[in-house]
Amino acid sequence: MNPLLEIRNIETYYDLIYAIRGASLAVDEGSITAILGTNGAGKSTILKTLMGLIEDQPDKGEILFDGRRIDGRDTEAIVRGGIAYVPEGREVFEELSVRENLLLGAFTRKDRDGIRRDVQRVLDYFPVLAERSHQWAGTLSGGEQQMLAIGRALMNRPRLLCLDEPSLGLAPLLVQEIFHIIRQINAEGVTILLVEQNARMALAIAHRGLILENGRFVLAGSAADLLQDPNVQEFYLGVRSTASAKGYQRWKRKRRWR
Amino acid sequence: MGTFLENLVTGAALGSIYALISIGMTMVYGLLKILHVAHAGVYVFGALLGLLAFRLTGSILFAFPAAVLGCALMGYLLYRFMYRRVQDEKPLIPLIVGIGMFTAMGDAYRLAAGPYSISFEHGLAQTGIVLGTFHISFNQVLVIGSAAALLVLVWLMVNKTKTGLAWRASAQDREVAMGIGVNSNYMFGLNFMFGSALAGIAGVLVGLYYGAVNANMGEVWAYKVFVVMVLGGLGNVTGTVIAAYLLGLAETFIISSWGYFLPRDAIAFICMILVLILMPNGVMGKRKQV
Ligand SMILES: Nc1ncnc2c1ncn2[C@@H]1O[C@H](COP(=O)(O)OP(=O)(O)O)[C@@H](O)[C@H]1O
Ligand SMILES: [Mg+2]
């Protein structure tokens, strides 16, 4: 079976900044795939490139969704094709109501009745949002805003849901709740591409994971394998190995991956 | 009492025109943070097209659709071929593009229509309603009435349509809006068409109200629209409408009580400077845009 999403050796520039330096990735239908990496590794850039949000990028490489090329297409067409995107930082429209935010998530859809049913479905799914559906999104708490951002993406009835650091800046209990929701969405048949710095949480729900450093994937494998990998344990899960006290050790081990 | 009511009506008519012209520019600012100086040129185009249609057909009923269609097209072209190319540059660059366009448009109008006022008299201009000493002209009814209807239309468009929702979302965060599938550039094009059509109607109304149009009639308005926009809190449509009526009324009442101690436009700018000093975020304070 072909993967639902396939990224083949893409390279992305921000003007002169070479941000993604040849990255390939395959996401199987029905799976949760996690992209892990530290700040500035290029995680968000990969998602933005996939969504067609960076003008004239990717500079090289191909992106295939359901077997069809989508690189170089308008974001609108990519979204209509069945990919939804939750940007980093709980980006809801603060001065629009919760309901209006949800309606915007269905912007590329035309089926009025289906949209109305889906608003109700999302509100049933997130009862805290239902209570506040006429309030401005800016009045919601951080966790509620993240739920709204996810609900808004679901309004697109996506086959693939891309989430950029959904745990960012949330209290641990809320992080757990959000990850629980992500797993539940996946169980209902939506394929998930999850970008995270919180490797432990991400690998706990993901089937596969990839580690991104400086615009390249340096390691990929099943979540279970990654959890066992000594490098991942040391640098992404914070498990101390005996040798890590020496500063140069970190650098050496990282080099080996390339 | 009669004078008070008459001032009220005169001020409201003036405010109606300020509002119709300013809305388009305010929406563009809210969406793109561009000072669309050439908007006053669109307004003059509407006045001239309206006059042309009136001359050709002999009926003011044709003046309005001609201005609406012509200005919507002009607004679209201005966006598509000028602003869209520079909308992501530093704000100074679209501003200079706008100033250049406005200057070129003024010259084109003077070439086409000459530098003098052209009469835009219509048969109903002298009629009106008289109640004792109180008198409302047909033109005042026309201006205030059509502005009220159009403001309702603007409100419905912005608040009750999918396009309006996309405008409000794009004004708050264009990248996020695009990321969830809003075709922002198309929506901006529609916004230019809509705001420009309103300015075109305002052009025809001003021509009818003063009984004349003039290729230079945009010059002062270009600056006065700034006053209204700034008073309204840059990019805020509701604030702009309120500011437009406040300015129209203030000008009328100040002049009626104290006479022309300064030229009318100087009074408008003094209002702006005072408000800016006292309320730097405009009459609405700092709140939502579009
Ligand atoms: N808009 C931008 N313009 C220029 N450089 C950028 C831009 N966004 C990100 N970058 C650079 O690209 C690299 C990857 O950034 P990003 O994808 O945001 O990383 P991550 O999401 O993994 O933290 C960083 O070096 C960052 O400085
Ligand atoms: Mg990021």
Image (cartoon, coloured by chain):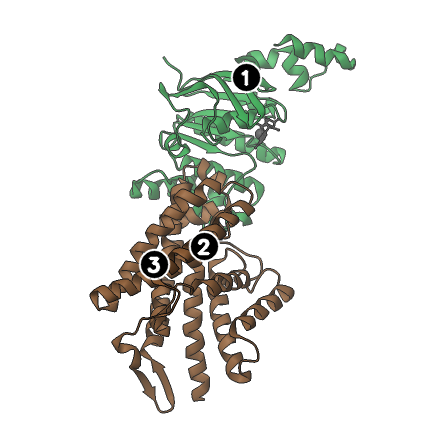
Q: Is mark 1 within 8 Å of ligand 1?
A: no
User: Which residue in the rendered view is the most extreme toward the left?
Assistant: B57
Residue, disc 2: B102
Amino acid type of the residue that numbered disc 3 sits on in the rendered structure? Ala
Give the label, 2 or 1, closer to the camera: 2
x, y percent for residue B248 = 48, 72
* Pointer 3 local density, CA inside 10 Å: few below 14, some 14–19, many at least 20: few
Amino acid type of the residue that numbered disc 1 sits on in the rendered structure? Leu
Name which residue lies at 53% across and 84% down.
Answer: B257
* Pointer 2 local density, CA inside 10 Å: few below 14, some 14–19, many at least 20: many
Name which residue lies at 55% across and 32% down.
Answer: A166
Among numbered discs 2 and 3, the one appearing first in the sequence: 2
Residue, disc 1: A210
x, y percent for residue A172 = 62, 33
Report which colour depicts chain B. Answer: brown
User: Which residue in the rendered view is the most extreme toward the right?
Assistant: A246
Q: Tell if the residue under mark 2 belongs to the same chain as the one under mark 1.
A: no
Whether A205 is drawn above or below B18: the answer is above
Residue, disc 3: B112
Output the chain of dot 1: A
Are discs 2 and 3 less than 8 Å apart at CB?
no
Name which residue lies at 57% across and 62% down.
Answer: B282
- Specify the quarter for ligand 2: top right
Report which colour depicts chain A. Answer: green
Amino acid type of the residue that numbered disc 2 sits on in the rendered structure? Phe
Give the label, 2 or 3, closer to the camera: 3
Q: Measure the C-alpha gap from mark 2 to mark 3.
A: 15 Å
Output the chain of dot 3: B
Secondary element at image label 3: helix
Whether B288 is drawn above or below A89: the answer is below
